[in-house]
Image (cartoon, helix red, strand yellow):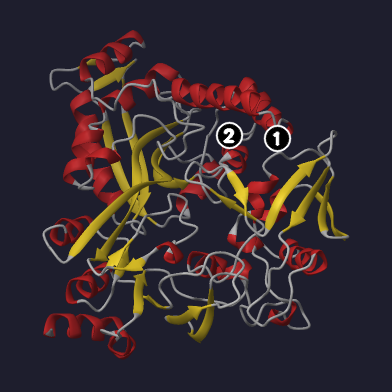
Amino acid sequence: MMPLRSSLLGAGLLAVAASTHATEGVLDIVAPWEVGSTDPSKAGYVYTRLQIGETLVEVDNQGHPQPSLAESWTVSDDQLSWRFALRPGVRFHDGSPLTAEVAAKALQLALAKPGMLTEAPIAAITAEGDELQIRLNSPFAPLPALLAHSSAQILAPASYNETGEATQVIGTGPYRIEQLQMPQKLTAVAFNDYWGEAPAIEQISYLAAGRGETRALMAESGDADIVFTLDPASQARLQRNNRLSVHSEPIPRTVTLKVNAGHPFLAEPEARRALSLALDRTGMAVALLRTPEAAASQLFPPSLTDWHLSEVAGAERNLEQARALLAGLGWQADGKGMLSRNGEPFKLTLTTFADRPELPLLATAMQDQLRELGVELTVNVTNSSEIPAGHRDGSLQLGLMARNFALVPDPLGTLLQDYGPEGGDWGAMNWQSPRLGEILQQLLAHTDGETLASLRREAAGILHQQLPVIPVAWYQQTAAVSSKVEGFSIDPFERNYRVSEMRWAQ
C-alpha cells in the first residue's frame, strides 16, 4: 500500500481517497475531471454523468435523440416552432414538481450563459400549458441534440440564486447529492421518488484525480471500483489484473493533422493525400496508443454511425502511392531521398501541444514517417493556443490536434464551426467547398431521415476526398472496473456513466 499512499499524497488526495476506501455498499468512481462549479454552464457534465441532473432529451449509442424529461416533441412545418411534451409526475430532489414553466425558466437561464444553446437561433423559450415551446428565427434541425447537452439540464427553481447562478444542484435524476466537496469529491444516494426505474446501487462516490498514475493505482488497490481514462501503459498493466476488467470504447474525438491548404506545398488535394498515405497509423496506434483499433481511416469514428463511411478501406500506409502522387506534382528526390521542386526543398513545420501527452509522441513518429517520403518536418511543441493563433495570422503550416465531434451528440454544430467559408480554428484553413457549405445549410433545415442520411454521407465523402484535415487516430475512452461490479458499459458520447444500470456482483 505504500506506493499508493505516497502517490496519493503527492497528488493531494490522500485524505479524500482514504475516506472512500473499501466503503461497503458505495460505488467509488474516479475520473480526471474536477467538480469545479454547481452551475451547469461550467461543470454540468459532472452532474449528468453521475445521473443527478437530466436534460429534456437523451441520446442512444448512435447519437440519436431519445425521450428523457420530454416524452415527445414536434416541429412546425416551417421548422420555426418546436413543442416538447414534458413527462408527467416528475419531481426534483427537493420534492418540487417539474412543470413547463420550470423547464422554460431553466433553459432561459442556460441561454443567457455561455453554452451550446447559444449556437441555435432561438427567439423565445416559453411554457404553453403542459408543453415547452421554443421558437426559432431560422430552421435549426439539430435543436434536440443541443437540448441533450449538459449545460441544458433542468434544475429545480431552488437551485438558482437571485442572479440566476446555480448555487446547488437539485436535479431529477436517479441519484441526488448527499455531500459536495468542490473541486474533488461528491457523494450521492438513490432518489426514492425517481420517475424511472430505481437503481440497484444505492450509494455512489465520485473523486477527481488528475494524475493518471494515481487513478491506475486506486484501481489496483481497490480504492476505486471504476476508474476512467487510463494512460496506455497503465491500461496494459491493469489488463493483467484478474480482479479488474478493462473497457475501451471509441468516442467521437479524432486526432487530426490540420493543413494550411493555402501553402504552395499543400494546396493540391493530391499533396494532402500523399502525406496521409505516408502515415503509419496502425504502427502509431499499436506502439504509442496501445490500441490497434485507434488507427483512423477517416475523420468520423465508427461511434458516429450516421457520418462514418463503412465502405472506406482501412488505414494502410502506402509509400509507393504517396511518392507517385508527389512526383505527379513535380516533386523530385535527391540522392538522399529528400524531395524538392523548382529548387525548393519540401520542408514544413508541424505545431502541436503537450496538454494531450500523446500528441508530441505522435508528432515525432510522423516526423520520421514523412522523412521516408522525402518530406522534412520540424516539430514545434508549444501551447494549444498557438494553433488557432497560427490559423488566424496565416503562419500555421501543419497542426496536430484533437477535435471533439460530440460536444453535442450531433456533430453538425462542430462542422459548421470548422468547415464554413472561412474555415475554423480547429478545422479547415484556406480551404472551402461550396458544395459542403450547401450541404451543411441543408442539414440545418431538413428533418427527414433519408434526406439527412444522404447529406451526411455526401459531406463525409467530401472531407475524406479533399482532406482539409488529415485524420490520424480515433480516441478511445477507457475504464478499469472492479469484478465486484456488473452491468458496466461506456457511453460513447461521455454524457452518462450509466450507474443506474449497474449492480453488485452476486
Return the residue at label 2. 419
Q: In the image, what residue type sits under mark 1?
A: Leu
SS at badge 2: loop
- Estimate the x, y position of residue 137 in percent, counting from the top left: 84, 44
SS at badge 1: helix
Nearest the viewer among 423 and 8 is 8
State which quarter of the image contains the C terminus.
bottom left
Q: Residue furthest top?
A: 328
- Estimate the x, y position of residue 203 in percent, counting from the top left: 42, 79
State which quarter of the image contains the N terminus.
bottom left
Nearest the viewer among 57 and 312 is 57
Nearest the viewer among 363 and 95 is 95
Give residue 73's mark.
none
Q: Report the residue at 27% width, 39% height from top.
A: 293
- Note whether 132 is above or below 314 in the view shown: below
- Estimate the x, y position of residue 470 in percent, counting from the top left: 40, 32
Please give left or right for residue 132 compared with residue 58 in the image: right
Q: Please report whichever mark, 2 or 1, sits nearer to the chain's N-terminal start.
A: 2
Please give left or right for residue 505 compared with residue 129 in the image: left
Return the residue at label 1. 444
Q: Judge whether residue 464 can be spotted in this image.
A: yes
